[in-house]
Image (spheres, rainbow, N blue to C red):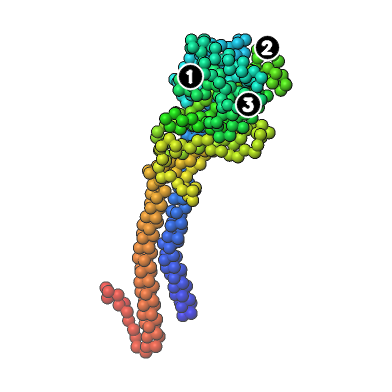
């Protein structure tokens, strides 16, 4: 009797464990499936964002390379122009005019405004120099009778624009002393750049914005390259100073340059800012310079879509591309809202994955829960029937053991 009871208890415990396992499994699936869905959605989100960031960085680098190549081509033109002066003893105005015409600046160098030659004039030679320019009739028969170095004032030396092409609409620059240019934000830094260019012989820029009023205010930047007298040694600073004749320079319209590099579609979502960081060698700077904004694409009139606020910097992609131009470090900063770069369809992938994962988890939970409930009900019914059978057999056994009469059991066929 004890053995039978133990068997019944063992089977009951097994049944209870089976019921417990079948009841817990759906909740385990739910507990794992929901976090897994969010985790997978997060992975897809990161993947979509990484792909968009790579695409944005590639576009930013391409734009930066285009602008850098154009700026370097401007520098190459200046080297060619210096070679003109180095190959001839005296470059006359007509020769300069024809050389610039042959370059076809308007079509081949978009953003290029003008090329010029600034002569170095000492104070003692000022009057003689002005008179020589007034009598120059190589292009205009009447010469330039009103020519004078400007702005007025006595200075120890002058860096005077004497050749300028094209001249139309830029007559105001003829005779301008670059070391005292009133159109520059800081004329003293322009003067320092001129002297540094004379001493080094390198292509230089002061990165000073030149604001010129031509119907509307236009912002120019300029680069300059020193010109030395033919045949004189220029191995040392002292020799370069002694051989220095002046400098050739290029002015370019920052807005036109940037507009040519940024197409209209890109301007709708991408913001570009150009900063001047300072000279390559900090010792070249006469004073402590700070990061200065040279250009902002917002001035082109196209506002980026969904422009992020300063408090939501993490909602945008930012790419910084530093380049060395004219012995200065310029920094291109590209900025675009993430949701514009990513696109609507790509942005929906994480949501689709999350919704699909949650739906699949809930469906699997429902199926397992339904199967578990059915199994539990079947196990409970079987346990109840087994218990009733055991109790019936036990009652029959007790009756049979305690009965004094003969008990006969017949099967349905009537057999004993």
Quick one: label 2, few (<14), some, or many (20+) residues within 10 Å?
few
Q: Is residue 414 left or right of residue 290?
A: left
Sequence-wise, the earlier of marks 2 and 3 is 3
Quarter-of-image position of residue 287: top right
Judged by depth in the image, the label closer to the viewer, 2 or 1, is 1
Sequence-wise, the earlier of marks 3 and 1 is 3
Specify the label residue 235 is tagged with.
Answer: none
Specify the label residue 154 is tagged with.
Answer: 3
Q: Is residue 61 visible?
A: yes
Where residue 44 appears, as percent x and y from the top left, is 45, 47
Above or below: residue 52 compared with residue 148: below
Q: CA distance from mark 2 to mark 1?
A: 30 Å
Callout 2 secondary element: loop
Callout 3 secondary element: loop
Q: Is residue 78 visible?
A: no
Q: Which residue is mark 2?
A: 231
Viewport quadrant of the C terminus: bottom left
Where residue 293 appears, as percent x and y from the top left, is 53, 38
Callout 1 secondary element: loop
Q: Which residue is mark 1?
A: 167
Answer yes or no: do the residues labelled 2 and 1 have beta carbons within 8 Å?
no
The residue nearer to you, when weighing 346 against 155, is 155
Quarter-of-image position of residue 149: top right
Judged by depth in the image, the label closer to the viewer, 3 or 1, is 3
Q: Residue at x 36, y 77 (%)?
A: 388
Quick one: label 3, few (<14), some, or many (20+) residues within 10 Å?
few
- Residue ranking furthest to the bottom: 404
């Amino acid at each position: 009797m004890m053995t039978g009871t133990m068997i019944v208890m063992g089977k009951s415990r097994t049944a209870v464990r089976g019921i417990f396992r079948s009841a817990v499994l759906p909740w385990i699936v739910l507990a794992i499936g929901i976090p897994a869905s969010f985790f997978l959605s997060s992975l897809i989100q990161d993947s979509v964002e990484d792909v968009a960031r790579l695409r944005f960085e590639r576009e930013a680098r391409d734009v930066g390379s285009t602008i850098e190549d154009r700026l370097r081509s401007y520098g190459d033109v200046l080297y060619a122009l210096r070679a003109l002066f180095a190959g001839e003893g005296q470059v006359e105005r007509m020769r300069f005019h024809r050389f610039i015409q042959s370059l076809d600046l308007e079509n081949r160098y978009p953003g290029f405004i003008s090329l010029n030659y600034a002569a170095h004039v000492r104070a003692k030679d000022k009057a003689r120099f002005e008179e020589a320019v007034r009598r120059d009739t190589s292009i205009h028969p009447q010469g330039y009778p009103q020519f004078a170095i400007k702005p007025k004032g006595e200075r120890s030396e002058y860096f005077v624009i004497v050749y300028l092409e094209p001249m139309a609409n830029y007559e105001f620059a003829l005779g301008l002393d670059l070391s005292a240019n009133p159109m520059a934000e800081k004329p003293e830094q322009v003067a320092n750049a001129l002297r540094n260019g004379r001493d080094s012989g390198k292509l230089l820029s002061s990165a000073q914005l030149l604001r010129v009023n031509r119907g509307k205010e236009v912002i120019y930047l300029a680069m300059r390259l020193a010109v030395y007298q033919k045949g004189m040694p220029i191995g040392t600073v002292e020799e370069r100073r002694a051989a220095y004749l002046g400098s050739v320079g290029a002015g370019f319209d920052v807005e036109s340059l940037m507009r040519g590099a940024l197409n209209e579609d890109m301007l709708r979502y991408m913001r570009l800012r150009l900063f001047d960081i300072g000279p390559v060698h900090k010792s070249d700077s006469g004073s402590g310079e700070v990061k200065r904004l040279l250009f902002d694409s917002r001035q082109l009139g196209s506002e980026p879509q969904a422009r992020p606020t300063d408090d939501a910097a993490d909602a945008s992609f930012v790419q910084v591309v530093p380049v060395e131009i004219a012995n200065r470090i310029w920094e291109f900063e590209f900025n675009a809202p993430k949701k514009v770069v990513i696109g609507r369809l790509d942005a929906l992938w994480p949501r689709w994955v999350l919704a699909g994962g949650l739906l699949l988890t809930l469906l699997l939970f429902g199926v397992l829960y339904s199967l578990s409930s059915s199994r539990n009900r079947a196990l409970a019914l079987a346990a109840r029937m087994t218990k009733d059978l055991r109790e019936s057999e036990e009652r029959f056994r007790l009756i049979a053991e305690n009965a004094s009469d003969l008990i006969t059991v017949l099967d349905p066929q009537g057999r004993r």
